[in-house]
Amino acid sequence: MAKLDLDDIQRRMDGAVANLKSDFCSLRTGRASANMLDSVMVNAYGTKISLNQISTVSVLEHRMLSVQVWDGGMNKVVEKAIRDSDLGLNPQSYGKTIHISLPDLSEERSKQVRRIAAKYAENAKIAVRNVRRDGMDILKKLEKDGCLSRDERRLYEQDIQELTNIYVKKIDEALEDKDKDIMQV
């Protein structure tokens, strides 16, 4: 028998917002963030590995990143992976360390980043709505099975809709904050 767990619904909606914030961290806004290289995949040891699994990324200045590759022989491969990523970065090797100076965002690149951020936000909203739909389906099944009255189902539906509205608002606020961050540059 199906069972409704509002805490699980809230946890899943929290996950959608957390994923959105993680996606936002990977967007280049002109301000350095160690997370912005999380999406960079490196061809290392015969397989594709995330950059953060073979190096330490740190912020030197507000527009400068430092990548310390643990295996010094991988520097050229890491440089190429960063250069080939869609982040528009040009890494420079200084011995065992790779420095990445973040250029100013052009107006065109800024608009492109804003569109990507909006797409991430829309995907998060879709995830939240899917969680809502799953909850509503459980309620209908519980009512059909005789475990809930029609009035109880409607009350739970209102609770789920309120949660959905709260999380959609959180997503909109996160997008608005990211938009401001992008336009500040």
Image: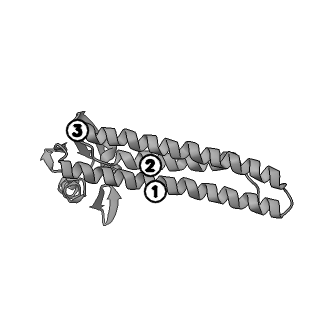
Instruction: Find the distance from the CA under tag 2 to the CA under tag 1.
Output: 8 Å
Check the image and name the residue furthest to the top: 61
Mark 1 surroundings within 10 Å by alpha-carbon count, few (fewer than 14), some (14 through 19), many (20 or more): some
Q: Which mark is residue 123?
A: 1
Identify the mark nearer the N-term, 1 or 3. Answer: 1
Which circle, 2 or 3, is nearer the viewer?
3
The reply to whether the C-beta atoms of the residues labelled 2 and 3 are less than 8 Å apart is no
The reply to whether the C-beta atoms of the residues labelled 1 and 3 are less than 8 Å apart is no
| Viewer-proximal residue among 21 and 79 | 21
Placement of 145 over or under 4, stated as above or below? below
Q: Quadrant of the N terminus?
A: bottom right
Image position of 61 (left or right of 172): left
Q: Which residue is drawn at 63% across and 59% down?
A: 133
Image position of 22 (left or right of 167): left
Instruction: Find the distance from the CA under tag 1 to the CA under tag 3.
Output: 25 Å
Q: Quadrant of the C terminus?
A: top left
Identify the mark nearer the N-term, 2 or 1. Answer: 2
- Element under disc 2: helix
Instruction: Find the distance from the CA under tag 2 to the CA under tag 3.
Output: 21 Å
- Element under disc 3: loop
Instruction: Estimate the x, y position of residue 80 in percent, counting from the top left.
Output: 19, 58
What amino acid type should be assigned to the residue bearing mark 3?
Val
Instruction: Estimate the x, y position of residue 100 in percent, counting from the top left.
Output: 18, 44
Instruction: Estimate the x, y position of residue 92 in percent, counting from the top left.
Output: 13, 47
Instruction: Return the residue at label 2.
Output: 20
Instruction: Estimate the x, y position of residue 109 in percent, counting from the top left.
Output: 22, 51
| Viewer-proximal residue among 43 and 107 | 107
Identify the mark nearer the N-term, 2 or 3. Answer: 2
